[in-house]
Structures are given as C-alpha cells and as structure tokens.
Amino acid sequence: MFGYVLANASSLSKEEKEIYKAHYCGLCHVLRERYGQKAIMALSYDMVFLEMVLSDLTDATETKGAERCVPHPVKEHAYTITPCTEYAADMQMLLGYYSLLDKVRDEGKGKSEEKKMRSLLPDLEKKYPRIAESIRNGLALIGENEDINSKDAEGMSLLFGKILGEVFVYDESSFFSDDLRGLGCGLGRFIYLLDAWCDRKKDEKEGAYNPLEKGITEDQMRQLLLDAAAAASDAFERLPLDQHVFILRNILYSGIWSKFKEEKK
C-alpha cells in the first residue's frame, strides 16, 4: 500500500533532486546499519517524506557522507542522515512488518520474511508502544470491515489515516503534534483511497476486497482524493518549515497525484 508519496522530479531543480536523493540514501543507509541488508526491501519514499518533515521541523543537524552500496556498487553517492532518520527507519520496519503480516493473512505469501521480521517486533513495540498499538488496533478494525465487505471508502480510509497519523507524531509532547497527526492522517486517507483506485480492476478480477463501489467515476474518485489531500495540506501549512519546504510542497501538491494521473492515461 505504500510508495505513493513521491516527488514530481520533473519540477525539481538539479540541486533539489540531489538533496531529495541524499535523504533517500540516508534512510537506506540507516536501515542497512540497523536491520541488515535485506531491510532495504522495506524502503519507501513515504518515510523519506516523514524524515524530511521532522528534520526540518526540529532543525535537526545533518550528517553527510558518501558511499557505494549493493544497489549502486560502481559510483559513490551522497547521503544525508539526521536524528530523525533513525525514527523513520524504525517506522519503516514497524509498518513493514504489519503490512507483511497482512499480506500473509490475505494471500498466504511472505511467510518466511514475516518470521524473520517478527524477531524485531518486541523491541520496536517496547520502544514505540503508542504507535504499535495504533497500528494493531487500526489494522484489526480494517480487517473486520473487510470481512463484512464494507463499501464505506471514506470510513475505511480514515481508519488507515489514523494509523499513519500516529506514526507522524514522533513526540506526543510536541507543540506540533496535532498538526503532524493531521498531516499523517490526511496522507494516510489519500494513500488508502489511491491504492484502492489503482487496484480496483485487479481486485474485481481476483474477487478480492476493495472498498470502492463498483462503477465509481473518475470525478467521484478525484473528489475523495482532493478531500484527503486538502486535510493533509491544511495541517502541513501550519508547520513552521523552511529548509526543504519546496521539495515537501512538490511532493504534497504534485508528486502524490502521479499514480492517479498515470491510471487516468
């Protein structure tokens, strides 16, 4: 379900592309350092967005470096790491585990990977009890509604939005926790709805669950997505961001719509 929170690279300058890629490589670097080489399979740009938002918001110190890696063994590439990168890496693994568990339950696939990742779960759940509980409870509610074939797409998207909203709140005591929760929730709603739209034909063919009513039009879908994106944008603009705000706005106002435009074509 992840992988929709991307930048529109065609609208970024060369320097901005390099900054964005360096943060992506920084998250990849930390995932490998903390969880091993195979952990990069869980890597997504969604958590790069989270890391950049939190790093900007907290004025986090950036540590820069360059390295070769398995995906790019020939030429060194730059990476940027902040204290928020570790948090984003932990969230990537926590969400990745529950996403994989959901796949095992639904499709019976990924059992060996789930077993390996399960060993990480106790430490992550102990370190982030609020977030882990939110993910468990939210996915359980989503599962219950899937079992009764709920067609309340907005309600279903809100359940997923609440999960991502808690992930965005790295510190409940932060003055900005409400707006971070609103940003994550709006994005989560958008991701869930867009994923349902992109999968609707495949789901219908395979007889799999999809929250969208059969025959929903492109205009109706666009309005659902606009409502979710507007909620995320309202919360985002209340955050005092300045360091990489153009890149972040590019993602939020343009990049996240890329898959919807591709589907339209």
Image (tube, helix red, strand yellow):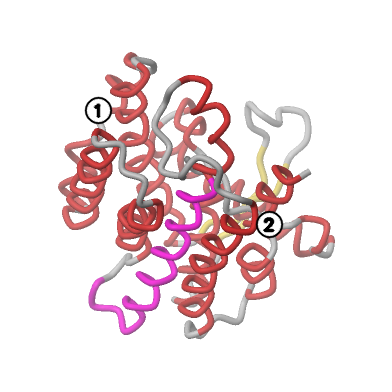
Numbered marks: total: 2
Q: Is residue 123 rendered to the left or right of residue 29?
A: left
The answer for how far apart the CA atoms under marks 1 and 2 are is: 31 Å
* Kind of element beneath mark 1: helix
The image shows residue 192 at horizontal and vertical percentages of 45, 49
The amino acid pointed to by label 1 is Arg
Q: Earlier in the sequence, mark 1 or mark 2?
A: 2
Q: Nearer the viewer, mark 1 or mark 2?
A: 2
In the displayed structure, would residue 3 be above or below residue 116? below
Q: Work out whether 125 lies above or below 202.
A: below
Q: Quadrant of residue 249?
A: bottom right
Q: Hey, what amino acid is under mark 2?
A: Ala
Q: Residue at x 66, y 29 (%)?
A: 71
Nearer to me, 66 or 218: 218
Residue 259 in the figure: left or right of residue 123: right
Q: Which residue is mark 1?
A: 118
Residue drawn at 45 percent across, 38 percent down? 33
Decide whether residue 173 is among the magenta residues: yes
Q: Nearer the viewer, residue 142 or 253?
A: 142
Q: Position of residue 228 (x, y in %)?
A: 49, 65
Can you identify the residue that label 2 sits on? 7
Residue 99 location in percent, x, y?
36, 35
Pick out the residue farthest to the front. Answer: 215
Q: Is residue 53 magenta?
A: no
> Which residue: 30% across, 79% down?
174
Q: Which residues are magenta?
A: 172-194
Secondary element type, mark 2: loop
Q: Position of residue 84 (x, y in %)?
A: 43, 61
Main secondary structure type of the part rendered in magenta: helix
